Amino acid sequence: MNRSVSALLFPQAGAQAKAQPTSPDAQKVAAIEKAGGRVAAIAQNDSRLEVDFHLQGASVSDAALGPVAGLKDVVHLNLGKTGITDAGLAQIKGMTTLTRLHLEQTKITDKGLAHLKGFTNLEYLNLYGTEITDRGLEEIAGLTKLKSLYVWQTKVTEEGVGKLKKALPNLEIVTGWEQKEKK
């Protein structure tokens, strides 16, 4: 188990640690790590958590998200380049503390984005290389704290981006279209 997470879950670490029962959060962290994920505090004196699966690739399936959904204070979740689908997003729909969510190069579609409606604290969303269309952008139009959105190599159109920009005028939307035009 990650040392910083151990300190959060077992603040009395040391000689007493042997007698301490396994907490539900420690069991969830162990399950996440067994599935190839990494759990860490976002800073030394901050109990909020980051969960990262992006280095494990397509072997990470929707089943890996069960223990993640039960953790408290997860603010960063990286599922990029995994086998996560819309069904996986349904499992994490209650994680309203998230501020950053990486879904790039996953199998999610517009249907999955409907599960993000309650993510009122979300500031960063990466959808690069997914099957998202303009319909998916409509699903996230209510995320008023969203500051950065990446939709490069998706099926969104200029029209869909324009509508989302009207709904969220302070949102920076990276489409990648500008880079193509420069070549």
Image: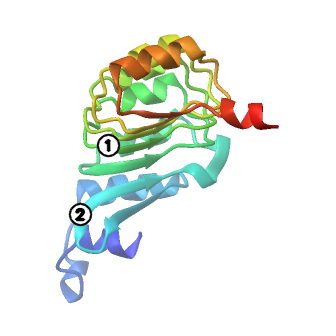
Disc 1 marks a residue whose amino acid type is: Leu
Residue picked out by circle 2: 47
Residue picked out by circle 1: 98
Q: Earlier in the sequence, mark 2 or mark 1?
A: 2
Quarter of the image with the N terminus in it: bottom left
Q: Which sits in the foreground, 145 or 2?
A: 145
- Is 10 located above or below residue 183 in the figure? below
Disc 2 marks a residue whose amino acid type is: Ser
Horizontal placement of 161 versus 28: left or right? Answer: right
- Is 41 located above or below residue 110 in the figure? below
Residue at x-position 51% and y-position 19%? 161
Around disc 1, counting alpha carbons within 10 Å, would you say few (fewer than 14), some (14 to 19), or many (20 or more)?
A: many
Around disc 2, counting alpha carbons within 10 Å, would you say few (fewer than 14), some (14 to 19), or many (20 or more)?
A: some
Q: Which sits in the foreground, 88 or 49?
A: 49
Quarter of the view holding residue 22: bottom left
Residue 176 position within the rendered picture, expressed as x and y whole percent measured from the top left: 65, 34
